[in-house]
Image: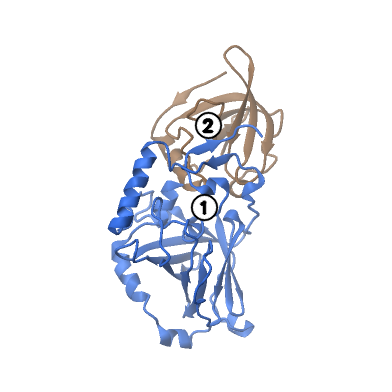
Chain colours: A brown, B blue
Amino acid sequence: MKLSIRTGCALLTLALGATTAVAHHSTAMFDMQHTVNIKGTVTQFDWTNPHTFIYMEVPNAQGVQEKWGIEGMSPNYLNRNGWTRHTLKPGDKIEMTIHALKDGRKGGFCASVTFPDGKVMYNLPHRG
Amino acid sequence: MRVAMGILLLSLAAAGTAAAAADAPHAAAARSSPQGDTWASIAKLPDWSGVWDFDYSAAAPGGGLVRPAPPHLTPEYAAKYAAYKERQKHGEEQQTSTANCVPPGMPQIMAQPYPVEFLFTPGKVTVAIEAYSQMRRIFTDGRKHPEDPDPTFQGNSIGHWEGDTLVVDTVGFIPTSTIAPGVGHSDQMRITERIRKISDDVMEIRQTIVDPKVLTEPYVSVKHYKRHKDWDIEEYICSQNNHDSADPEGRAGFKIQE
């Protein structure tokens, strides 16, 4: 599994964006100060309220597939920002930048998705 | 969420004084303004068509995100707020019941990161709120508040037009709604909103909250909403696929699997 942790002002901006835009709950359970990248295969994409939800199979360091569950912004927000319910589909190979759960379980909140061709789709509000 | 709520509750001290004065009845203006009591009268009301999205950048003076000071509280509610902040240090009060899909009610429902739409019918302005698929009914037919209104999420709203400004008075709120995070309200809370366009595509809502048991002075916020003529209010069924939760002490839960 490719796992990298980055910090910096840009990410703080993302974190602030998240707290303003996630309507129905606080981001207390996510590490909004840091991001983690996970790389794997989409198994399910729920285009639902109050949040979209992305399930991925991500190989760990031993090559064993682990299932991750990642919350995203609502379809109402995302479809006004370039996403559709077809943006992700089972089988898609993606790299996702997330704010991981603080409790260590394999979950988090999606900040952005990078596709194999290098295209980036932002999930959280993004400046610039 | 906490920042969002905070921004909503931006205390603009200077604006507060002005708004309090402006809230005095303008009987003459009201008498001479179309009140939307008939379809012909509605045609004379300002054009509020389209949907209006809460603008965070405009909510903070100078732009950017500002975490405002809490409102000025009575000793009783200042103590309650201090206890709330203390519980936060122990992992409680991280999350509200909105995480369980209970709508926040007034006033928080008017500062969600989702658009609202204003619908005019004779004697009534209806506010369709995308977040939690909520609705507010503002009666403009001259009726008074009920003597003893049942407490509701949106409260009981009556309004009148002063020129192009809709002035709304709301009372009768559920006990669990909050003025700001950690700041509840009493049965004496009253919310006044002055709603008007400040340009063709910007709506301003100047909101004044009074509650003699909780606040030592009126709590004023000014919120801006941006018009999107090509958007529609969309469905938002919070219980459709909710992975989040708050326990009774406000600890945050997150369910990964279905």
Give the x, y percent position of residue B244: 56, 40
Q: Which mark is residue B189?
A: none
Regarding mark 1 in the picture, which secondary structure is present there? loop
Q: Which residue is mark 1?
A: B113
Please state if A89 lies on the left or on the right of B178 as rendered: right
Residue at mark 2 to residue at mark 1: CA–CA distance: 21 Å
Residue B136: x and y in percent read 56, 66
Dots 2 and 1 on the same chain: no
The foreground one among B145 and A39 is B145
**Hey, which quadrant is residue B122 in on the image?**
bottom right
| Other residues around mark 2 within 10 Å, as few (<14) / some (14–19) / many (≥20) | many
- For the residue pair B129 and A40, the one nearer the viewer reads as B129
- Asked whether, in this view, residue B35 is left or right of residue B190, the answer is right
- The answer to whether residue B54 shows anywhere in this view is no
Q: Is residue B90 above or below residue B110?
A: above
Residue type, mark 1 in image: Pro
Quadrant of image for the C terminus of chain B: top right
Given the image, what chain letter belongs to the residue carrying mark 1? Answer: B
Residue drawn at 52 percent across, 48 percent down: B97
Q: Chain of mark 2?
A: A
Between B93 and B119, the one nearer to me in the picture: B93
From this view, report whether residue A5 is shown above or below residue B122.
above
What residue is disc 2 on? A98
What type is the residue that disc 2 sits on? Answer: Ile
